[in-house]
Amino acid sequence: MLQTKIFTAVVALLFLAHVNAFVPLAIRATHTRLHMGFFDDLKQKIVASSAGEYDVPMVSSKLDEIVKSSSSGVVMMTFQSCPYCVKAREVLESNSIPYTDIVLEDLDNGALKGPLRAELGKRFKQTSVPAIFLKEEFIGGANNGGKGGLIPLLASGEFQKMLL
Protein backbone atom coordinates (compact mmCIF):
# COMPACT_ATOMS: atom_id res chain seq x y z
CA MET A 1 0.00 0.00 0.00
CA LEU A 2 2.72 2.47 1.02
CA GLN A 3 4.83 1.51 -1.99
CA THR A 4 1.87 2.21 -4.29
CA LYS A 5 1.37 5.66 -2.74
CA ILE A 6 5.05 6.50 -3.04
CA PHE A 7 5.14 5.25 -6.65
CA THR A 8 2.10 7.39 -7.50
CA ALA A 9 3.69 10.44 -5.91
CA VAL A 10 6.95 9.92 -7.81
CA VAL A 11 5.09 9.50 -11.10
CA ALA A 12 3.15 12.72 -10.41
CA LEU A 13 6.38 14.59 -9.66
CA LEU A 14 8.06 13.30 -12.81
CA PHE A 15 5.03 14.25 -14.91
CA LEU A 16 4.99 17.77 -13.47
CA ALA A 17 8.74 18.14 -14.02
CA HIS A 18 8.33 17.00 -17.63
CA VAL A 19 5.43 19.39 -18.28
CA ASN A 20 7.27 22.22 -16.53
CA ALA A 21 10.20 21.87 -18.95
CA PHE A 22 7.94 23.02 -21.78
CA VAL A 23 6.29 25.93 -19.98
CA PRO A 24 7.87 29.33 -20.78
CA LEU A 25 9.97 30.78 -17.96
CA ALA A 26 7.71 33.84 -17.50
CA ILE A 27 4.70 31.61 -16.89
CA ARG A 28 6.67 29.36 -14.51
CA ALA A 29 7.85 32.40 -12.53
CA THR A 30 4.26 33.58 -12.14
CA HIS A 31 3.07 30.23 -10.81
CA THR A 32 6.08 29.22 -8.68
CA ARG A 33 4.25 29.64 -5.39
CA LEU A 34 1.33 27.57 -6.62
CA HIS A 35 3.68 24.76 -7.62
CA MET A 36 5.63 24.93 -4.36
CA GLY A 37 2.42 24.81 -2.35
CA PHE A 38 1.41 21.70 -4.28
CA PHE A 39 4.76 20.04 -3.58
CA ASP A 40 4.68 21.05 0.09
CA ASP A 41 1.25 19.45 0.47
CA LEU A 42 2.40 16.36 -1.43
CA LYS A 43 5.51 16.03 0.72
CA GLN A 44 3.45 16.37 3.90
CA LYS A 45 1.10 13.63 2.68
CA ILE A 46 4.00 11.33 1.82
CA VAL A 47 5.61 11.86 5.24
CA ALA A 48 2.29 11.34 7.03
CA SER A 49 1.65 8.17 5.03
CA SER A 50 5.13 6.79 5.72
CA ALA A 51 4.72 7.52 9.45
CA GLY A 52 1.93 4.93 9.54
CA GLU A 53 -0.50 4.80 12.42
CA TYR A 54 0.69 6.38 15.63
CA ASP A 55 -0.61 7.82 18.87
CA VAL A 56 -1.36 11.38 17.70
CA PRO A 57 -1.96 12.89 21.19
CA MET A 58 1.27 11.37 22.53
CA VAL A 59 3.38 12.53 19.55
CA SER A 60 1.75 15.97 19.56
CA SER A 61 2.52 16.22 23.28
CA LYS A 62 6.15 15.23 22.58
CA LEU A 63 6.36 17.98 19.95
CA ASP A 64 4.89 20.46 22.46
CA GLU A 65 7.56 19.37 24.94
CA ILE A 66 10.33 19.93 22.37
CA VAL A 67 8.99 23.37 21.42
CA LYS A 68 8.65 24.42 25.08
CA SER A 69 12.21 23.25 25.78
CA SER A 70 13.37 26.09 23.50
CA SER A 71 11.92 28.75 25.82
CA SER A 72 15.37 29.97 26.83
CA GLY A 73 17.37 29.13 23.73
CA VAL A 74 17.80 27.13 20.54
CA VAL A 75 16.48 23.61 20.06
CA MET A 76 16.89 21.66 16.82
CA MET A 77 15.23 18.47 15.70
CA THR A 78 17.72 16.74 13.41
CA PHE A 79 18.93 13.56 11.75
CA GLN A 80 22.47 12.59 12.65
CA SER A 81 23.98 12.70 9.15
CA CYS A 82 21.61 15.04 7.30
CA PRO A 83 23.83 17.58 5.45
CA TYR A 84 21.54 20.51 6.35
CA CYS A 85 21.56 19.43 9.99
CA VAL A 86 25.36 19.18 9.96
CA LYS A 87 25.53 22.67 8.42
CA ALA A 88 23.15 24.10 11.04
CA ARG A 89 25.28 22.58 13.84
CA GLU A 90 28.44 24.05 12.28
CA VAL A 91 26.87 27.50 11.91
CA LEU A 92 25.60 27.57 15.49
CA GLU A 93 28.93 26.35 16.85
CA SER A 94 30.98 28.79 14.74
CA ASN A 95 28.82 31.62 16.09
CA SER A 96 29.18 30.31 19.69
CA ILE A 97 25.42 29.87 20.02
CA PRO A 98 24.50 27.11 22.47
CA TYR A 99 21.78 24.74 21.33
CA THR A 100 20.09 21.48 22.19
CA ASP A 101 20.20 18.88 19.43
CA ILE A 102 17.34 16.39 19.46
CA VAL A 103 18.42 13.62 17.09
CA LEU A 104 15.23 11.95 15.90
CA GLU A 105 16.88 8.58 15.31
CA ASP A 106 17.71 8.49 19.04
CA LEU A 107 14.14 9.10 20.28
CA ASP A 108 12.49 5.82 21.22
CA ASN A 109 14.96 3.93 19.00
CA GLY A 110 13.87 5.98 15.98
CA ALA A 111 10.19 5.03 16.35
CA LEU A 112 9.16 8.70 16.71
CA LYS A 113 11.09 9.92 13.66
CA GLY A 114 8.23 9.57 11.16
CA PRO A 115 5.40 10.56 13.49
CA LEU A 116 7.23 13.69 14.71
CA ARG A 117 7.92 14.77 11.13
CA ALA A 118 4.24 14.22 10.29
CA GLU A 119 3.20 16.38 13.25
CA LEU A 120 5.78 19.03 12.25
CA GLY A 121 4.12 19.13 8.85
CA LYS A 122 0.67 19.56 10.33
CA ARG A 123 1.69 22.28 12.72
CA PHE A 124 4.47 24.18 10.92
CA LYS A 125 4.03 23.13 7.27
CA GLN A 126 7.57 21.72 7.20
CA THR A 127 8.48 18.06 7.44
CA SER A 128 12.19 18.37 6.78
CA VAL A 129 14.99 18.69 9.27
CA PRO A 130 16.61 20.52 10.80
CA ALA A 131 13.54 22.00 12.43
CA ILE A 132 14.89 24.84 14.56
CA PHE A 133 13.07 26.58 17.40
CA LEU A 134 14.11 29.67 19.31
CA LYS A 135 12.18 30.78 22.36
CA GLU A 136 9.23 28.57 21.39
CA GLU A 137 9.09 30.04 17.89
CA PHE A 138 9.69 27.99 14.76
CA ILE A 139 12.42 29.76 12.79
CA GLY A 140 12.65 27.13 10.04
CA GLY A 141 15.49 24.96 8.84
CA ALA A 142 19.08 25.77 7.95
CA ASN A 143 18.21 27.88 4.89
CA ASN A 144 14.47 28.57 4.82
CA GLY A 145 11.03 27.94 6.30
CA GLY A 146 9.39 29.38 9.38
CA LYS A 147 10.81 32.86 9.96
CA GLY A 148 13.29 32.43 7.11
CA GLY A 149 15.76 29.84 8.36
CA LEU A 150 18.85 29.93 10.56
CA ILE A 151 21.48 31.08 8.04
CA PRO A 152 19.43 33.91 6.47
CA LEU A 153 18.31 35.12 9.91
CA LEU A 154 21.92 35.18 11.13
CA ALA A 155 23.08 36.99 7.98
CA SER A 156 20.41 39.67 8.43
CA GLY A 157 21.08 40.12 12.16
CA GLU A 158 17.50 39.09 12.98
CA PHE A 159 18.56 35.90 14.77
CA GLN A 160 20.80 37.83 17.14
CA LYS A 161 17.89 40.17 18.00
CA MET A 162 15.65 37.19 18.64
CA LEU A 163 18.23 35.74 21.04
CA LEU A 164 18.02 38.77 23.34
Image (cartoon, helix red, strand yellow):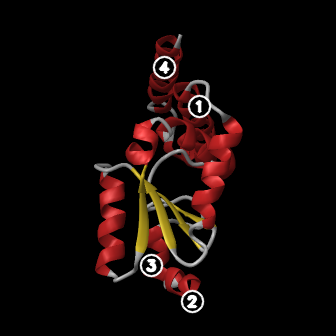
Mark nearer the N terminus (1 vs 4): 4
Residue 154, numbered label: 3
- Say if 4 sits above or below 114 in the image: above
What residue is pinned by disc 1? Answer: 48
**Residues at discs 4 and 2 in contact (Cβ within 8 Å):** no
What residue is pinned by disc 2? Answer: 164
The image quadrant where one finds the C terminus is bottom right
Give the residue at x 35% y 56%: 84
User: Is label 4 or label 2 in front?
Assistant: 2
Apparent side of residue 27 relative to residue 153 in the rendered image (left or right): right
- Quick one: SS at disc 2? loop
User: Is label 3 or label 1 in front?
Assistant: 1
Residue 42 locus on image (x, y percent) = 59, 32
Please, what is the three-letter code of the amino acid marked with disc 2? Leu
- Quick one: SS at disc 4? helix
Q: Quadrant of residue 28?
A: top right
Mark nearer the N terminus (4 vs 2): 4
